Each structure stands twice: as structure tokens, then as C-alpha cells.
Image (cartoon, rainbow, N blue to C red):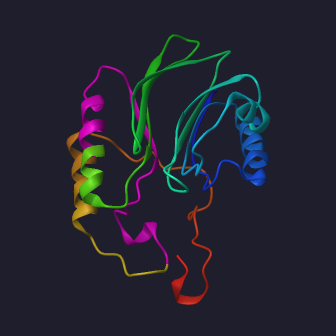
Amino acid sequence: MSTTLFWNCRGARKKAMGNYLRHLVGDNDVHFIGLVETKVETLGRTEVDKFIGVQWNFFHFPSCGKSGGILVLWRKDITSFDILEANEQVVVGNLCLPDGVCWTIAVVYANKDHHVRRNLWHILSQYATGDRPFLIGGDFNCCLSQSEKKGGKRFTYSAGAQEMADFLSCNDLHDLGFVGPKYTWSNNKDGTSKI
């Protein structure tokens, strides 16, 4: 069985990120990886080979300074990935597996401003109506319920959350869940400022 991995790595050049990524790939038969918040403006073949290996192809949408960035990697010996669209919020492409099955996959690093994020929902909705299975993963920078967040400001069901919920409902998309700890990110602050 092959696995798809989405991860907000908060910096693709961190040594620990490469070590952890290789461990995840080795333990889980990963064939496709979507890394977001890479914080990398330029990335070359040599760097990719160093942190994941030579058997991986990649597409990198650069960060703007130290903010954002999307890196998509796929095993070139068993898959192909054709880019359909790429911008600062999403990379969309068709992933074809060895058994001939093809999926449309979107790797998301959504803007924190819900007004800007509206363009993301519009783009994704165009691909959700296709004839292929559609998988979306990444960091949506939006919570739909209090259970998705601990600490910081109290959760409110904002206009941004309503727009995301509407997008999911209108396109018949469902949360598949994830493997790992309940909370996968921390702002590394102390006391009541910790999220």
C-alpha cells in the first residue's frame, strides 16, 4: 500500500526536517509528499537529493521571503505528477500510480486572510468537479471547530470558517482524518499565549 503525506514543515532547510521526513517515508511506503510553509525561495535538485534521495522528482513554488512556499515530491520510479496549476496558496496536479489509477491532488498553504483565501476555494472547486478522485491536503489556516485548536484566542465560527465549510459541502468533500498526535503544531510560546 502506498501513502500520501502532507506536512507543514515550517522550514524545508532544517536538518531535523530532512531526518524526520526520511524516517516517515521509510516507515510508511510514501509515494507522494506535499510540504507547505517551506520558507524557501529557491530549491535545487542537489538539495532535494540530499534531504529525500535521488528517486524523487519535485516541484517547488517559492516562498515570499520567509513566508509560505510549497514543495511537492513524488517517487519518479513508480508515479508521475503533472502540474495543472500553481500559485502561492495551492499546487494542483494529476498523480498517476503504477496500477493506472490517477488522482487529482491539491497541496494547500492557504492565506490567513479569508478574503484572499476565497480565490483558493474558487480554484479548488474547478478541480473538484472532475472525473478523477480528488485529494486535498495541507494547511488551510482555518479551524472549523474548537476541537481543532487549544489555547490562544477563543474559537469563533468566523466568516472564513463558514466559507471553508461551504466549500467542503458544495463539493461533497470529506475530512479523512490523519495519523499522528491530535495537535500537530505549536507556536512555541509560553503561558496563555501558547497555541
Q: Nearer the viewer, residue 161 or 100?
A: 161
Left or right: residue 53 versus residue 102 is right
For the point 45% across and 18% down, which residue is it?
Answer: 102
Look at the picture and state if 152 lies above or below 120: below
Whether 139 is among the magenta residues is: yes
For this view, does 102 lie left or right of residue 128?
right
The stretch of residues the image draws in magenta is: 121-150
Q: Residue at x 68, y 15 (%)?
A: 77
Tell me the residue at 28%/53% (across/down).
Answer: 116
- Front residue (pair 58, 127): 58
Residue 161 sits in quarter: bottom left
Can you give x and y, in whole percent of width and height, for residue 32 in the image?
Answer: 59, 31
Task: Return the residue nearer the eye: 138 or 85.
Answer: 85
Residue at 37% across / 81% down in the picture?
A: 154
Q: How many marks?
A: 0
For the N terminus, give its image quadrant.
top right
Q: Give above or below for 121 relative to 146.
A: above
> In terms of image quadrants, where is residue 73?
top right
Say which of 180 and 154 sits in front: 154
As drawn, 87 above or below 140: above
Left/right placement of residue 104 relative to residue 4 reads left
Residue 98 lies, in percent from the top left, at 59, 13
- Location of residue 165 by image quarter: bottom left
The single residue placed furthest to the top in the displayed view is 100
**Could you tell me residue 138's position as x and y percent?**
48, 47
Vertical placement of residue 41 versus 187, above or below: above
Residue 37 inside the magenta-drawn segment = no
Find residue 149 and report its horizontal and vertical position in percent: 46, 71
Q: Residue furthest bottom?
A: 191
In screen coordinates, is 64 left or right of 57? Answer: left
